[in-house]
Amino acid sequence: MRKLKDIVVFRNERLYASFPTVARTREGELLVGFRVGPREKLPTHFHSQSRAVCVRSSDDGETWSREFSAISPEDELGQQDPSLRALSDGRVLASYFRWQFHPLPERDGLKKTRVLREAKGGLMRLAGVAVCTSDDGGRTWSQFRRVHIPEYDDVAAVRGRTEELPDGTLLMPVYLVGGENYVHILRSVDRGETWEDFSVVVARPPGRENACDEPTLLRLPSGRLLCFIRAYGEGGLMQVTESLDGGRTWEAPRETRVWGFPQWAISLRDGRVFIAYGYRKEPYGVRARIWDPEQEEVDEAEELVLRDDGVSPDLGYPSASVE
């Protein structure tokens, strides 16, 4: 594979745009969802004014709408990492997680909060996962719906590809910040209206914190489900686990020799898999591999350099779509 060219999807010098995902609608348009927030001298991953938005292209990504549209305008909390997924019936699903701002004097009242971050002028509390759906190709969106995760509502986050099974069941990978079980799968049987029946993919290792996060899913033509996981420690090598029963049970994760995170994987028309990931060593950028998961391990595939001109190690967050 060779890269043809780079195209700027969105740029605004007053905004910090980040964490994109791409989906192709039933009408053939491309949607890119991403997070925007005020541009500051030192941008962070959380801001009370961050919003989940999207832009569109009707010419296979050559040109993009100049203005973005909000995915969840009714949600007044900070919105992070919107992930788009076009479903087989034409519906587009958007999932994201939320931050709620609190003034510093409220610190004492937040002592029981499990995930709290200091931010400019206040505190940011993790406020769980939400979803919106669109039945007109991302032009309008439903009101956001909180995703209830028993015992873990205030520690759950999402950044990864939701998968659709042949019977229409949706599987959404979430990760828990500070929870006992680090990677979960949530299941929806009503096209994303409600989510329940979660299963544990990776449990927290004893005595470890922040062991892994930012999972993404991929269903192979054979029916195998793969979950790619950003891992910490042991050199930060990518971990992979698989399920043979529709995501209800998972094998123990195995460590690969692929260094780079977070990941995004899609199936190509010939059955091979394309996986892209941020490369956070100099030269910073984005790299990818293509391999046949039924015949070889991802470690054996040639590494492709897509970009190597990043200015800091906090980058990547790639997404991909098949033409």
Image: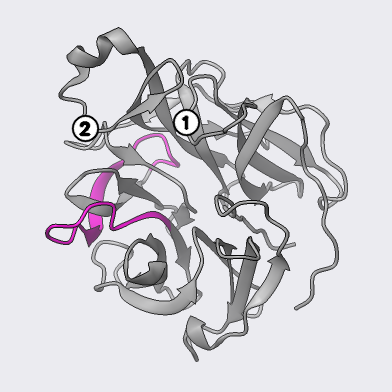
Calculate the distance from the C-alpha at mark 1 to the C-alpha at mark 2.
Answer: 16 Å
Task: Check disc 1: other Cα within 10 Å, few if <14, some if 14-19, many if 20+.
Answer: many
Q: Secondary structure at mark 2?
A: loop
Q: In this image, 133 relative to 4: left or right?
A: left
For the N terminus, give its image quadrant.
bottom right
- The residue identified by callout 1 is 46
Q: Nearer the viewer, residue 322 or 42?
A: 42
> Is residue 211 shown in magenta?
yes
The residue tagged 2 is 114
Q: Is residue 177 above or below residue 134?
A: below
- Label annotation for residue 148: none
What are the residue bounds of the magenta stretch?
190-215
**Camera-side residue: 209 or 62?**
209
Q: In this picture, is 271 found above or below 108?
A: below
Q: Position of residue 308 (x, y in %)?
A: 71, 64
Residue drawn at point x = 46 percent, y = 20 percent = 120
- Write the residue at 35% across / 61% down: 232
Question: Residue flagged by tag 1: what amino acid is it?
Answer: Phe
Q: Using the image, determine if residue 7 lies above or below residue 165.
A: above
Amino acid residing under circle 2: Arg
Whether residue 155 appears in magenta in the rendering, the answer is no
